[in-house]
Image (cartoon, rainbow, N blue to C red):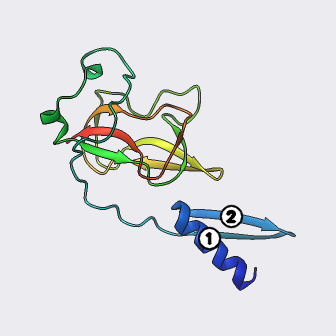
Amino acid sequence: MNLKEMRALLELFREYGLTEVEIERSGERIRVRREAPPPPAPAPAVGAGPAPAATQAGPAAEPLRDDRRQHLVTVEAPMVGTFYRGPSPDADPYVREGDVIKEGQVLCIIEAMKLMNEIESKVPGRVIRVLAENGQPVEYGQPLFLIEP
């Protein structure tokens, strides 16, 4: 791999927020991996965008009042990719609305360039809303979950 190709690879890392990539060419394999940058301190979501579609019936499906929304933490997509609620299509989701979660608990997977990236909670609390649809593409910074600390 020459210097020009290495720079292009590093640019892809930066542009798409990748943490790992593996390339095989002519019998040679190269794997580049970096630690994800530490996330910014969670900030309460104030007006976190359009109202999410309800993903289950019951008390969690009611619209959130602005005073309640102010103290919620928004978990955002750290990269562009495909959002999956569970480890496989026939498995239960990692979390559901109303679940109590711990800091570091896996919330979902985002598939980016054939790599499965587990997205973990940065705060303990309760899942109030799941804002993304299973199997759908997500953008960098797109809200995925609302967590009540």
Identify the residue under disc 2.
22
Q: Is residue 140 visible?
A: yes
Q: Amino acid at mark 2?
A: Glu
Report x, y in % for residue 97: 33, 27
Q: Is residue 111 left or right of residue 142?
A: right
Q: Quadrant of the N terminus?
A: bottom right
Q: Residues within 10 Å of mark 1 (few under 14, many from 20)?
A: few
Q: Nearer the viewer, residue 32 or 10?
A: 10
Q: Position of residue 123 (x, y in %)?
A: 26, 48
**Residues at marks 2 and 1 touching, judged by CB atoms closer than 8 Å:** yes
Residue at 52% across, 46% down: 110
Determine the residue positioned at 32% across, 40% down.
49
Residue to which mark 1 is pinned: 32
Closer to the camera, 130 or 123? Answer: 130
The single residue placed furthest to the bottom in the displayed view is 3
Q: Quadrant of residue 82?
A: top right
Residue at the outermost left position: 67
Q: Dividing the picture into quarters, in which one does residue 48 lie? A: top left
